[in-house]
Image (tube, rainbow, N blue to C red):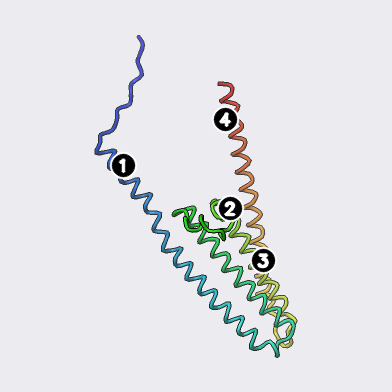
Amino acid sequence: MSTEPTTPTRPPRWYEQVEHGGERFLFASRWLLAPLYVGMVVAVVAVGIKFFQELWHLITHIVGFTGDQVISSILALIDLALLANLVLIVIFAGYENFVSKIAAARRSEDRPRWMGHVDFSGLKMKLIGSIVAISAIGLLADFTNLEEPGKRLDETLLMWRVILHLTFVVSGVLFAIMDWLGEKRLLITKQTHGHADESD
């Protein structure tokens, strides 16, 4: 006795409408992230204000500063600039990955090359790379300040900063290894499926 395959029954129209409406609502919920990125623009402005405060302090005290103090002030400026770059990377890449494409940037000649090509994995690597760079500059500033006369060396604080920096470095290496393993597994899967399709 042969059994004929049963054709799947189509769900009622009201069910499809409810499902479609729910999916549209979920997809539109991505716009809840937009105010967060606007708030991060305000954070860039705050970093800029602090940057110019440090710059003004350097300019007004440049005559009385020693060479190490000038280096320390410049490192602080670089640290703030890297922090602003980090926030902008999160704004641009996060908005394009999770909210919407930035059409205005698509028509601009000043559009960064990495915009539109940084996925979540790439964003994660850029973040950890920026954090490592900021931490390294902070450590360099700490070691520069050690030579200031009359300044007490806090060995415990310096040790924990070194440990924290090494933790960032190790985390970045582990993230890179995980991404490499994931890409390798994806390549092997594609090759395996490709051979399976050819055999069919």
Residue 19 is tagged as 1
Check disc 2 and give the amino acid type. Answer: Gly
For the residue carrying disc 3, how many other residues have a C-alpha within 10 Å: few (<14), some (14-19), or many (20+)? few
Query: Nearer the N terminus, badge 1 or badge 2?
Result: 1
Check disc 4 and give the amino acid type. Answer: His
Q: In the figure, residue 109 lies in which quadrant? A: bottom right
* Badge nearest the viewer, 3 or 4: 4
Query: In the picture provided, is 106 more to the left or to the right than 64?
Result: left
Q: Mark 2 points at which residue?
A: 122
x 39%, y 58%: residue: 32
Tell me if residue 108 comes above or below residue 200 in the rendering: below
Query: Nearer the N terminus, badge 2 or badge 4?
Result: 2
Residue 171 location (% of width, % of height): 63, 57
For the N terminus, the quadrant is top left
Q: Mark 4 points at which residue?
A: 193
- In the image, 189 versus 60, the foreground residue is 60
> Contact, CB < 8 Å: mark 1 with mark 4?
no
Dot 3 lies on which element? helix
Task: Tell me how far mark 3 sits from mark 2, CA to CA.
Answer: 25 Å
Q: Mark 3 points at which residue?
A: 163
Residue 59 location (% of width, % of height): 64, 85
Query: In the picture provided, is 80 more to the left or to the right than 8?
Result: right
Dot 1 lies on which element? helix
* Badge nearest the viewer, 3 or 2: 2
Check disc 3 and give the amino acid type. Answer: Ile
Task: Tell me how far mark 1 sits from mark 3, CA to CA.
Answer: 51 Å
